Image (spheres, rainbow, N blue to C red):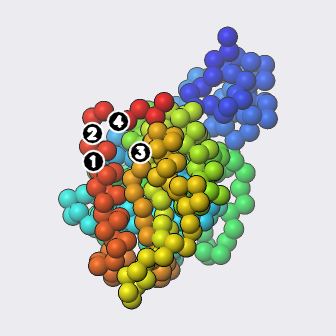
Amino acid sequence: MSEKPENAPEHCPGTESEDAGKSSACQGCPNQNICSSAKPKGPDPDLAVIQERLSSVKHKILVLSGKGGVGKSTVTSMLARGLALDDNLQVGILDVDICGPSIPRVMGLEGEQVHQSGSGWSPVYVEDNLGVMSAGFLLSSPDDAIIWRGPKKNGLIKQFLRDVDWEDTNYLVIDTPPGTSDEHLSVVQYLQNAVIDGAVIVTTPQEVSLMDVRKEINFCKKVKLPIIGVIENMSGFICPSCKNESQIFPPTTGGAEKMAEDMKVPFLGKLPLDPRIGKCCDEGTSFFEEFPDSPAVTSYQQIIKGIRRYCNEDDHMDTS
């Protein structure tokens, strides 16, 4: 029987098939070149290099969303900033949303560049304990478009994982593009030996978002990626003046909490819609420091507690 690499595309023909590396299902797969050669060379040798490089990173968390526009990158930045409020933690953000790298803007790092040292690429630091790496640092202008096919994007993701020197890091939060595409398969496959703690999945309350998140959850189950939990973002609007809450996106089918219950995955919590979060992201400032009394800060703190509790457990929850 023809073997399939772990985390291969759904319709992978298998490494021993005559179509290995040549079928339409092989497009964008990190192993395509290896499989298409006359004599397969075995596993990607860079996997061991990545494993060694990330051995000093204690926890690796993917942030996923089924649909764009649900605030995934904002949540990524807020989770990282919230974790970094603990001076005892070293935190990193890896932005692998190659075609839409917004992390440099929301972290106040636009115009920064990547520096190389003898130990590899150095992250750009927001605080002494919060570093960032993004494709946005490689652009001459934030308005430049990255027009790349899958293999080239996968190559940059591998380079980020293989060459960035995170030193001793407690939490590496990885911001991914929306959906279930090449980038997600590549990250999961490249990190298969480095151990991913799991995925945090971001959605909004309405069904048009939840229907895509269900696909994201099924993706995680198929590639055996643990699910730390689901976050419902933009869950009600908090008026900055009177603190009253209004439902901007009504949860017509029960919202993310009911969906998580139905699909038997953890629910981390709800994040209210506070327009000042958007303002802070545009300005690259910390919402936690600017508006510490916001109900959104309390919600983020509770979610971060849940993530830290999960990551410190020895036995992770089974997503099968």
Amino acid at dot 4? His
Callouts 4 and 3 close, C-beta under 8 Å: no
Q: Which residue is mark 3?
A: 266
Q: Which residue is mark 4?
A: 316
In the rendered image, the vertical position of residue 69 relative to residue 171, given as above or below: below
Q: How far is the residue under mark 4 from the one under mark 3?
A: 12 Å
Mark 3: which secondary structure? loop
Front position in the image: 191 or 260: 260
**186 relative to 286 in the view: left or right:** right
Q: Earlier in the sequence, mark 4 or mark 3?
A: 3
Q: Nearer the viewer, mark 4 or mark 3?
A: 3
Q: CA distance from mark 4 to mark 1?
A: 11 Å
The answer to whether residue 91 is left or right of residue 198 is left
The answer to whether the residue labelled 1 contacts the one labelled 3, judged by CB atoms less than 8 Å apart, is no
- The amino acid type of the residue labelled 2 equals Glu
Mark positioned earlier in the residue sequence (1 or 3)? 3
For residue 309, which numbered disc appears in the image? Answer: 1
- The mark that comes first in sequence, 2 or 3, is 3
Residue type (three-letter) at the residue carrying disc 3: Pro
Query: At which x and y percent is residue 157?
Result: 56, 49
Q: Position of residue 92 (x, y in %)?
A: 38, 58
Mark 3 surroundings: few (<14), some (14-19) or many (≥20) residues within 10 A: some
The reply to whether the C-beta atoms of the residues labelled 4 and 2 are less than 8 Å apart is yes
- What residue is disc 2 on? 313
Residue 15, quarter of the rendered image: top right
Three-letter amino acid code at disc 1?
Arg
**Figure check: 56 above or below 292:** above
Dividing the image into 4 quarters, which one contains the N terminus?
Answer: top right
